[in-house]
Amino acid sequence: MFKKSLVALLVAAIAVVFTMSAFAAKGDVAKGKTVFATNCAMCHGDAGKGDGAAAAALVPKPRNFTDKALMSKKTDDDLFKVVTKGSPNTGMAPYEKMLSEDDRWNAIAFIRTLAK
Ligand code: HEC
């Protein structure tokens, strides 16, 4: 009896740790802000609203990262994939060779602060 609940407790504890690490934000927001301002803001806008200087000429428009309803449907891995591989037939280029993996995660950490 005691042993069984101990095992259950252990399993629960491990599950909590795994869940926490799965949701733990990868990337550094402050660094991501700089990466974003330098590489992304001309299209996505300084505040991530998709209204950067180059956005007017783009079809489709850059994503509005402040749109909470939209952004909450995307996982960090979804975003990472687009930043890494780009989005075909759009202005969104692959940043696989232009930014380190860390900087791609940093940019995503910053993007995640925009939809509040
Ligand atoms: C030349 C303009 C341009 C630049 C620069 C740019 N993007 Fe984009 N981005 C776009 C467009 C346009 C889309 C929309 C693509 C689509 O509709 O599939 C997009 C989409 C995205 C998405 C997908 C969001 C979603 O809803 O799936 C992410 C994430 C993203 N951009 C991140 C970045 C980051 C990070 C940078 C800088 C490292 C960056 N973008 C630079 C134009 C740009």
Image: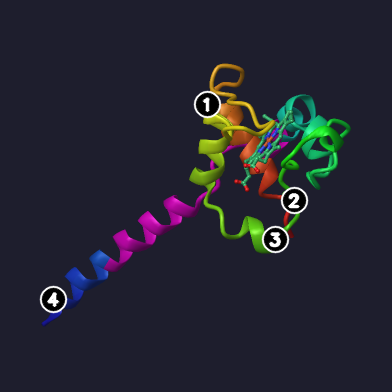
- Check disc 2 and report its element: helix, strand or loop: loop
Quadrant in which residue 16 is drawn: bottom left
Q: Position of residue 10 (x, y in %)?
A: 24, 65
Mark 2 CB within 8 Å of ligand 1: no
Q: Which residue is mark 2?
A: 114
* Ligand 1 location (quadrant): top right
Instruction: Give the number of the disc on residue 33.
Output: none
- Mark 2, Cα crowd under 10 Å, few <14 / some 14-19 / many 20+, is some
Mark 2 vs mark 3: in front: 3
Q: Quadrant of the N terminus?
A: bottom left
| Sequence-wise first label, 2 or 4 | 4
- Check disc 1 and report its element: helix, strand or loop: helix
Using the image, determine if residue 46 lies above or below residue 98: below
| Sequence-wise first label, 1 or 3 | 3
Q: Which residue is mark 1?
A: 101
Q: Position of residue 21 (x, y in %)?
A: 43, 50
Residue sitting farthest toward the right = 53
For the residues marked 1 and 3, what is the alpha-carbon distance in whole angstroms? 25 Å
- Check disc 4 and report its element: helix, strand or loop: helix
| Sequence-wise first label, 1 or 2 | 1
Mark 4 vs mark 1: in front: 1
Q: Is residue 17 magenta?
A: yes
Q: Which residue is mark 3?
A: 68
Q: Which residue is mark 4?
A: 4
Q: Position of residue 9 (x, y in %)?
A: 26, 71
